[in-house]
Image: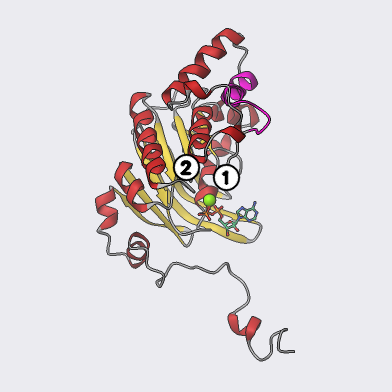
Amino acid sequence: MAPTPNSSLVELRDLTFGYGDRRILDGVTLTVPRGQVTALMGASGGGKTTVLRLIGGQIRPQSGELRFDGEDLRTLDTAGLYRIRRRMGMLFQFGALFTDSSVFDNVAFPLREHTDLPEALIRDIVLMKLNAVGLRGARDLMPSEVSGGMARRVALARAIALDPELVMYDEPFAGLDPISLGTAARLIRQLNDAMGLTSIIVSHDLDETFHIADKVIVLANGRIAAQGTPDEVRNSTDPLVHQFVNALPEGPVRFHYPGPTVADDFGPHSGAAR
Ligand SMILES: Nc1ncnc2c1ncn2[C@@H]1O[C@H](COP(=O)(O)OP(=O)(O)OP(=O)(O)O)[C@@H](O)[C@H]1O
Ligand SMILES: [Mg+2]
């Protein structure tokens, strides 16, 4: 029986995940509303990319629920996961283009890999996707011939090549100048609305992200510190969230990767002093 559609496309419930013994997510409960742009924010190393990888089925949670369109990913076999994954597009953090392939071939890659469509149809789809990101004219350029902002848009066209329902963007604005950043942000919003997508965007850029997101989720120290509309999150009194939305260096958000104390490493009995 098909699961009843509900307003959330993705749902995590009391989810825990760790790499080896290191707990990264500790009872995370969040929902990603259909048709909306949801921003996942939080300090570096907080587990944002990890959440995207869990949703993409690249890693599996240790406990808790993880649902995509009502289906619990934890109970799916490889074929089931593969079927679900085809409904998702991902723009990876540091996700590079294939340097030896043209812009066209980069966008065509997922279509050639995952479908048996004839080349003529692939051409039309690729040009449509490139058109959507304003780069139809750049089809024959090589990645070395496009700017960083253009490369990001090509990667975006590649992420939506298979007409996914969910698109996950990991740091789509990193390294962009303010104008390209604004363009990329508007593009994500427009594609979401025009194509009826659901988008999750991981970003450190507070202004631009709060501007385009319908919902903001703040992840801190392995837990959800806040989730709500941009205004609700901005006005949160939670100290973690306050530190984050005001970009304060001091506060409860951990900056250091867990390890020896400063005294252990630099104190009188440390290796250097010995
Ligand atoms: N494959 C891995 N094996 C072991 N530990 C990992 C692995 N990938 C990530 N980690 C650890 O998990 C934690 C969360 O990493 P993650 O990449 O999810 O953070 P993030 O919130 O995306 O950070 P950033 O904003 O810097 O991209 C980090 O402490 C990282 O060292
Ligand atoms: Mg990351």
Above or below: residue 177 compared with residue 1: below
Q: Which residue is mark 2?
A: 172
The total of numbered circles placed on residues is 2
Report the front residue among 23 and 272.
272
Report the front residue among 128 and 143.
143
As for residue 104 lying within the magenta part, the answer is: yes
Q: Is residue 271 rendered to the left or right of residue 208?
A: right
Magenta stretch? 98-114
The residue under the point 64% across, 61% down is 21
Indicate the quadrant where residue 75 lies. top right
Circle 1: residue type: Phe
Q: Is residue 206 visible?
A: yes
The residue under the point 47% across, 62% down is 221
Circle 2: residue type: Pro
In the image, is the residue at mark 2 within 8 Å of ligand 2 by its beta carbon?
A: no
State the separation of the CA atoms marked 1 and 2.
9 Å
Report the front residue among 101 and 78.
101
The residue under the point 41% across, 38% down is 184
Q: Is residue 18 rendered to the left or right of residue 244?
A: right
Q: Which residue is mark 1?
A: 94
Q: Quadrant of ligand 1?
A: bottom right
Residue 69 percent coordinates (x, y) = 44, 31
The residue most toward the front is: 145
The residue most toward the bottom is: 268
